[in-house]
Image (tube, rainbow, N blue to C red):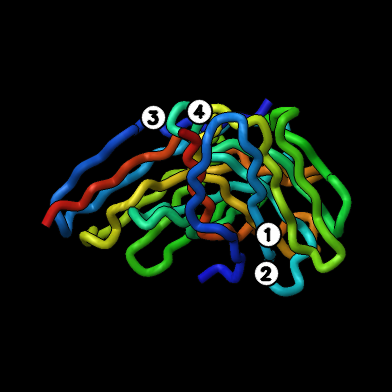
Amino acid sequence: AQKVTQAQTEISVVEKEDVTLDCVYETRDTTYYLFWYKQPPSGELVFLIRRNSFDEQNEISGRYSWNFQKSTSSFNFTITASQVVDSAVYFCALSEAEGAQKLVFGQGTRLTINP
Amino acid sequence: DSGVTQTPKHLITATGQRVTLRCSPRSGDLSVYWYQQSLDQGLQFLIQYYNGEERAKGNILERFSAQQFPDLHSELNLSSLELGDSALYFCASSAPGSTDTQYFGPGTRLTVL
């Protein structure tokens, strides 16, 4: 069965600090997809990134970067120079490549950026 | 704005009642997914429809049912409501490709009193 673990329940940092959100996953599939979603206080789920299991290149988008390591089954998310607007709950998710593409979510990490 | 719409935004009802949540996918998307977000269970997949047909079922209770109509909008019906059904219900849609990203609607917050 697929499983996603986000061990950090809550993180609180001061603005401009860098912060890394951890995500560890379990799957028997050889091909799968990994995602990060952001849930701001307003409640909607906002897609941030999708990664294919066969592409281990790290990705950077502005202040956001993602480190995918298949060897450790991890897909960590780093925010550089954090801002108050980054405060949200962040979810890591996994889906299989074949069959139903349901998302299996981690429990989420609540990130608070203090001014 | 993801392009996925959900109505109503909030719903307050009593135990034993029945409600219908509505979702309109992004233009061109054929797949619709329903998820439930509750404090104790987190975000859980309920059911998926693809072009009108049920494709996959998750942890959906027998009291819950869904359908996708010819215009591709979807409805999630919740009946014999219990206090524990209070949650945020999300709809997501994805494009026809089998591995496309799911984009989520704003959710419907259901409160059962």
Q: Residues within 10 Å of mark 3 (few under 14, many from 20)?
A: some
Label 2, label 4: how many angstroms apart (C-alpha)? 32 Å
| In contact (CB < 8 Å): disc 3 and disc 1 | no
Q: Nearer the viewer, residue A69 or B53?
A: B53
Q: Which mark is residue B93?
A: 1
Residue B71: give x, y in percent of width and height.
Answer: 82, 68
Residue type of the residue flagged with mark 4: Leu
Could you tell which of marks 2 and 1 lies nearer the N-terminus?
2
SS of the residue under disc 3: loop
Mark in front: 3 vs 2: 2
Mark in front: 2 vs 4: 4
Residue type of the residue flagged with mark 2: Arg
The chain letter for the residue carrying disc 1 is B
Residue occupying the point 88% across, 51% down: B53
The chain letter for the residue carrying disc 4 is B
The answer to whether residue A92 shows anywhere in this view is no
Q: Nearer the viewer, residue A79 or B76?
A: B76
The answer to whether residue A9 shows anywhere in this view is yes
Label 2, label 1: how many angstroms apart (C-alpha)? 7 Å
Instruction: Kindly indicate the quadrant of the structure image that contains residue A94.
Output: top right
The chain letter for the residue carrying disc 3 is A
Could you tell which of marks 4 and 1 lies nearer the N-terminus?
4
SS of the residue under disc 1: strand
Residue type of the residue flagged with mark 3: Ala
Labels 2 and 4 share a subunit? yes
Left or right relative to A13: residue B68: right
Mark 4 lies on residue: B83
Mark 3 lies on residue: A7
Q: Residues within 10 Å of mark 2 (few under 14, many from 20)?
A: many
Mark 2 lies on residue: B26
Question: Quick one: which residue is furthest to the bottom in this view?
Answer: B27
Q: Is residue A48 above or below residue B19?
A: below
